[in-house]
Amino acid sequence: MSFDLIADILTSVFLLLGAFLSLAAGVGLIRFPDAIARMHATTKPQILGLTFILAGIALEERQLSTTLVLMALLAFQMMTAPISAHMIGRAGYRNDVIAPGSLLVDELKQSIDEVQQELGRAENEPKNENDDGSPN
Amino acid sequence: MSDWVFIVVGLTLTAAAATALFRIIRGPSILDRMIASDMLLTTMICALGAEMIYNSHTRSLAAMFVLAGTAFLGSVVVARYVSRNGRL
Amino acid sequence: MTRQKRDHAVGPRAEVPRQATRREVRGNLWTQLPLLLGLVLLWTVLWGQATWISVITGFIVAITVTRVFYLPPAELSGRLNLWYLLVFLAHFFLDVAIASFTVAFQALNPRPIPASSVIGISLRTSSDLIMTLDAIAMSLVPGSLVVEADRERGILYLHTFATQTPEDIEAMRRKVLIVEARIVRAIGSKSDLARIHESEATS
């Protein structure tokens, strides 16, 4: 068995796995109940799917410059995906996109309520206890 | 590499893109549409990669970068818009 | 985010006390340098050729970018344990792989979608860098997503997917703390490390 054949087989497996993960993400996108749950389904399995496909490209090309570019692309995706996921998740949580009844416990709501009670005792108002200060 | 692999991959990615399109049309909120278009772009990156393997070239690498950047900027802008305006 | 990733890669060379004094005297040239070199490397990789022109234009672009989009300097501990960094990365990629397939099968499984939760986890360390890295690591592992981060009290609020029972929630809580411990072992400061050991001895 030559190396080329092994590389071809591995590339095929990687491509199929990547496509499968993309499709699973799409099914989750349709089935899951609210925006944040849908984000669990899409962004992150898709990064693994993309990793598989990029690994397939690297295996087929087998050139250092191409591999470096692919690694830069993957690093870019891995750094930006948590940022956009966090920002969308935060915006979603604050705008109550979470389907009612789909949460088992909600500790953030508990601590926001606690803070608001304390604030309410001192004086009423300030609703959002931190507006834009947390690290994004 | 045999052709049926690429046929299967192409059909699967097309189905994934179709689910994303469905979610973009259905909504219900702008965040859902943003998540779905993010996924559509990632599916396009995957498709570009598969095409590069099929035709064994590396000319689409720059396009993949641009798509990844567009997806990120789009989500950040929409998320900021939603947190600013408190409106979906 | 970029700078923090790059900085801890060259941890041992950037000693903390010197860094602190230099930063006052001469701006933050030393903390900027790893980021600059990383950007130049990225530029040459994108051009696909390492010629003098691409390196020099890379430096010009990198300096412009870091001047225009200024980032606050990351607080480094100055400690780096390569072995534990490898342990952390290996665990991390394994977690991503396993959890991605788990979520994929949950999506394809025809049974009803399990309930989610929002849980708050107070971290044992107080470093911004470790909190950021922990949040990134947890965000990339499918099934958990950082909704909110309380920097002052060191609490991460996670939206966890498919946590149906209190045991699932406890497991996720432990998981965040384990990831934190791995990061601290790799790049955390001595005091953070002591705090981790202390809490592990008591629990």
Image (spheres, grey):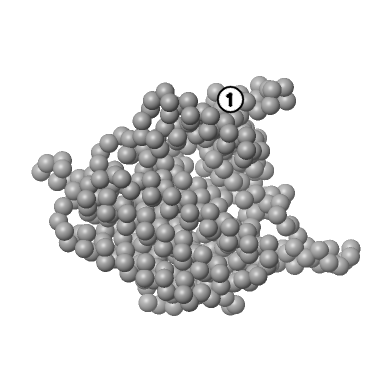
Q: How many marks?
A: 1
Asked whether the viewer can see residue A49, the reply is: no
Image quadrant containing the N terminus of chain A: top left
Q: Residue furthest right?
A: A122
Q: Is residue C54 left or right of residue C203?
A: left
- Residue C34 percent location from the top left of the image: 54, 29
In the foreground, A15 or A111: A15
The x, y position of residue C147, in whole percent, is: 60, 60
Where residue A68 sits: x, y (%)? 36, 37
Please name the residue shown 59% across and 30% down the image.
C32
> Looking at the image, can residue C191 be seen?
yes
Neighbours of disc 1 within 10 Å: few (<14), some (14-19), many (20+): some
Q: Amino acid at mark 1?
A: Ala
Q: Residue furthest left?
A: A1
Point 46% across, 61% down: residue: B38
- Rendering quarter of residue A27: bottom left
Where does residue C4 sit, x and y in percent of width and height?
57, 38
Q: Residue at x 57, y 43 (%)?
A: C1
Q: Nearer the viewer, residue B86 or C84?
A: B86
State the residue at coordinates (44%, 70%): A29
Secondary structure of the residue carrying numbered label 1: loop
Q: Specify whether A31 is left or right of C123.
A: left
Task: Write down the chain letter for disc 1.
Answer: C
- Judging depth in this view, the residue of C13 and A18 nearest the camera is A18
Residue closest to the eye, A117 or C171: A117
Identify residue for label 1.
Answer: C14
